[in-house]
Amino acid sequence: MRPLPYATSDRGVDLVAVERVLKGTLHHSALDPEWRVYAARHSDEPAKSVAQALGVAEKTVIRWRAEAGDAPA
């Protein structure tokens, strides 16, 4: 289930921080490890660009998405 469009958190994840990291205006080290997984699973961007923003390998993003039941991008 996706959070409401105006929500700033979802199950303890700071959605504003996640969005800023994915846009490149905040360094990925600001995210807790669980938040990085959340970002990878909920982003519609290609795995390569998400991996670069999160500071992880593309294969890691693909694995996180597969574990959530999402098709890899």
Image (cartoon, rainbow, N blue to C red):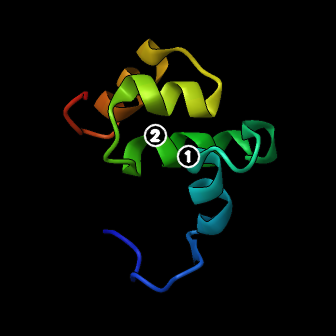
Q: Secondary structure at mark 1?
A: helix
**Residue drawn at point x = 73 percent, y = 46 percent:** 31
* Label 1 – label 2 distance at C-alpha: 9 Å
Q: Residue 2 is drawn in which quadrant?
A: bottom left
* Amino acid at pointer 2: Ala
Identify the residue at the far right of this view: 30
Q: Residue 52 is drawn in which quadrant?
A: top right
**Residue drawn at point x = 52 percent, y = 82 percent:** 7
* Amino acid at pointer 1: Leu
**Residue drawn at point x = 45 percent, y = 17 percent:** 58
Residue 55 in view of the camera: yes
Residue 36 in the image: state x and y as whole percent: 60, 41
The disc, 1 or 2, on the residue closer to the chain's N-terminal end is 1
Q: Which mark is residue 22?
A: 1
Q: Which mark is residue 40?
A: 2
Position of the N terminus by quadrant: bottom left
Q: Nearer the viewer, residue 2 or 22?
A: 22
Dot 2 surroundings within 10 Å: few (below 14), some, or many (20 or more)? Answer: many
Identify the residue at the far left of this view: 71
Dot 1 surroundings within 10 Å: few (below 14), some, or many (20 or more)? Answer: many
Position of the C terminus by quadrant: top left
Residue 5 vs 29, above or below: the answer is: below
Residue 71 vs 38, above or below: the answer is: above
Q: Nearer the viewer, residue 50 or 42?
A: 50
**Residue drawn at point x = 48 percent, y = 19 percent:** 60
